[in-house]
Amino acid sequence: MGVEALLDRIVEQIPAPVGRADAPARAMIFDSVYDAYRGVVTYVRMVDGALQPRERIQMMSTAATHELLEIGVSSPEPVPTKGLGVGEVGYLITGVKDVRQSKVGDTITNQRKPATEALAGYTDPKPMVFSGIYPIDGSDYAELREALDKLKLSDASLQYEPETSVALGFGFRAGFLGLLHLEIITERLSREFGLDLITTAPSVTYEVTTDTGDTVSVTNPSEYPDGRVAEVSEPIVKVGILLPKDYVGTVMELCQSRRGTLLGMDYLSEDRVELRYNMPLGEIVFDFFDHLKSRTQGYASLDYEPAGSQTADLVKVDILLQGDKVDAFSSIVHREKAYSYGTMMTERLRKLIPRQQFEVPIQAAIGARIIARENIRAIRKDVLAKCYGGDITRKRKLLEKQKEGKKRMKMVGRVEVPQEAFIAALSGDVETKK
C-alpha cells in the first residue's frame, strides 16, 4: 500500500475532530518548548472556536492574559498562518519568557469573549517520591532554578518549591512520579545544564495525625510534628518482580525484610518466576533496587504501582551534633529499624567529620530519647612535653587546666561539617575522609 493510499484510508476511517466553530475559543495546551530568542512556544489543539494573530488570549487556570504575536502550524517546520480553527493543531508565540505561565493541560480562550468552562480530562499528576536538590556550589542556585523551570515546560509532572537547609544551603524540594523519574531529572540537570548537584535521600508523603486530631502531610522529615503523634499513614505499592527461579529465596527474604506482604507467585516458564508483593513505598525508594540487582546478579526486573495507604508504627530519627539537630540527616523509619538507622548514621559521621579541638558527641534520637551515640575524640596537645622528672602533682595540675579549657571551648565551639562529609553520608559512601 502506498503512502497516499494509506493517508486516504486514515481520512476515511478515523472520524474528524468534533467542535463548534461559533463557540468561544478553547484550545488545549499539550506541549511547550523554550526558545532563547522568542520565549515560550506553546503547542495547542483547537477544540472550539478559532484564534487569530494579534488577539489577546487568556489562560484559564491562572487568568493571565497575553497578546498572540504569532500563530501557525508545524509542517514540519513552523509556518505562520492567519489562525487556527476547530480540530487544528498548531503553535502560539506570545513572547512570554516566564515558562511557568504555559502549563500543559491548561485551556486557552479569547480574552474579549472568554469561554466559561475549561476543557475537562486533565488533572495535575500527584508526585509520589520527594527529594531535596541542592547545588554543590551555592552560586549555582539561580541556574538550578532556571534549569528546573525549563524542564517543567516539557514535563508537567515535575513539581518543586524552594527549600533551605542549615547544612546544604539554598535548594529545592522536588516531587517526582517515581524513582526512574527522579533519576532522569537529576541526570538531565547535570548533562544538559552542567550542574553539580547533591540530592538528599528520597522520601515519600506521610499523613501524620496528632493527638489533637490535626492531620499533617509530611514530605520532608523536618515537617514532622514535634508533639505526640496518634497515627502515621504511609503509601503502599503493589510490586511485581520478574526473576530466575534460582533467586526466589533470597528475593523473598529481601522483600520480607522491607515489610513486604506476599500476594502471589507465578511460574511464567520453567525458569522464570513472577513474585507479587504489597510493600510500603518508603521501603523501596532508597536502595531496594540496588539490593535486588546485586542479589540476582542483575537478572531481576521491578515494576510497581500505587495501591493506597496503610497505618504503620513509624518514628522520626534525628541526628544531633553536639546537641544540635542536623535536618539533612533526619529520617522517618519504622520503629524496628530506628536503632539500626541511628547506629549506621552515627558510625558513618564519626568516620567522615574531622576531629575538632574539643570532643564532639554524635547522637541519634527519637524525640528526647537517645538511641545511639558515637564520640569524635578531641585533638589534644601534649602539654606534658615540657615536664620531665617525676613531679606528678605538676603534671596533674597541667592536665586539669587543659581539661577545663576544653570544657569551656566545647560550650562556645561549633562543629564544622565539610560538604564532602554530607555528600558521602547521604550517598552511602562510607570511605574515611581524605
Image: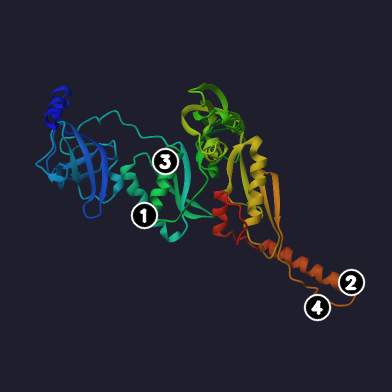
**Quarter-of-image position of residue 152:** top left
**Rendered location of residue 272, percent (x, y):** 50, 27
Hey, what amino acid is under mark 4?
Answer: Lys
Q: Which residue is mark 4?
A: 386
Seen from the viewer's position, the closer of residues 161 and 76 is: 76
Separation of disc 2 and disc 1 at Cα? 65 Å
Q: Which residue is mark 3?
A: 181
Q: Is residue 9 left or right of residue 382?
A: left
Separation of disc 4 and disc 3 at Cα? 63 Å
* Residue extending furthest toward the left: 82
Assign a secondary structure to mark 1: helix
Q: Is residue 299 left or right of residue 106?
A: right
| Mark found first going from the N terminus, 1 or 4 | 1
| Mark found first going from the N terminus, 4 or 3 | 3
Residue placed at 81% from the left, 72% from the top? 398
| Mark found first going from the N terminus, 2 or 1 | 1
Q: Nearer the viewer, mark 1 or mark 4?
A: 1
| Mark found first going from the N terminus, 1 or 3 | 3
Separation of disc 4 and disc 2 at Cα? 13 Å
Residue placed at 26% from the left, 51% from the top? 97
- At label 2, counting other C-alpha atoms closer than 10 Å, the crowd grade (few under 14, some 14-19, many 20 or more) is few
- Mark 4 and mark 3 residues within 8 Å of each other at the beta carbon: no
Q: Which residue is mark 2?
A: 392
Residue placed at 85% from the left, 72% from the top? 395
**Rendered location of residue 174, percent (x, y):** 43, 44
